[in-house]
Amino acid sequence: MGAVFELGKFLVSLIVCQLAGIIGFFSTRSAIQDWYSKLIKPSFAPPNSLFGPVWVTLYFLMGIALYLVWRQEDHRRDVVTALRLFVIQLILNALWSPAFFGLRSPLAGLLVIVPLLVFVFLTTVSFFRISRPAGILMIPYLLWVGFATILNASIWMLNR
């Protein structure tokens, strides 16, 4: 029973993270060609084809990190705090694409991604305290959200 429960936690961790990406996909899909492609972007903006594979990978790493923390004793205050921080950042993550692409508003995206970056940082620090591997798995996500914040801010500034 224990191994099945752990496998369930692992699968739920992966699926929940990928669901955030699926929400983003539906908001992004139609806006890429008819809106985003027409925006002025900074020279460091990556090609559109890079975003999908990067996000799928990041959601996978986040899912593993979530599992590594979730499998700890649930009643520990630090674990509960870390899981709450993770949920908050995942909700903000899921809201960014509808804000940026769905509303077609770099400013709305910026208003979501700045707190997202803060909560990803807090989650990463919190995860490190519980599980070093979980913290390490969050670093690429933290770096990417930092980059995305700069990209989002640049797009907003160039298209005001």
Image (cartoon, rainbow, N blue to C red):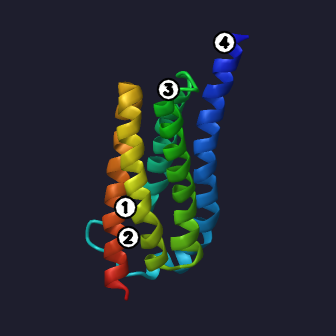
Rendering coords of residue 65 (x, y %): 47, 32
Q: Earlier in the sequence, mark 2 or mark 3?
A: 3
Q: Earlier in the sequence, mark 3 or mark 1?
A: 3
Q: Are marks 2 and 1 in contact (CB under 8 Å)?
A: yes
Q: Tell me the residue that label 3 is attached to.
A: 68
Q: Residues within 10 Å of mark 1 (few under 14, many from 20)?
A: some
Q: Tell me the residue that label 2 is attached to.
A: 152
Q: Residues within 10 Å of mark 2 (few under 14, many from 20)?
A: many
Image-quadrant location for residue 47: bottom left
- Nearer to me, 108 or 55: 108
In the rendered structure, the answer to whether residue 126 lies left or right of residue 79 reads left
Front tag of 4 and 2: 4
| Cα–Cα gap, marks 2 and 1 | 6 Å
Front tag of 2 and 3: 3
Q: Tell me the residue that label 4 is attached to.
A: 3
* Mark 4: secondary structure: helix
- Identify the residue at the far left of this view: 43
Q: Tell me the residue that label 1 is attached to.
A: 148
**Amino acid at circle 4:** Ala
Rendering coords of residue 53 (x, y %): 47, 48
In the rendered structure, the answer to whether residue 48 lies left or right of residue 14 reads left
**Amino acid at circle 3:** Leu
Q: Residue at x 38, y 41 (%)?
A: 124
- Is 136 above or below relative to 158? above
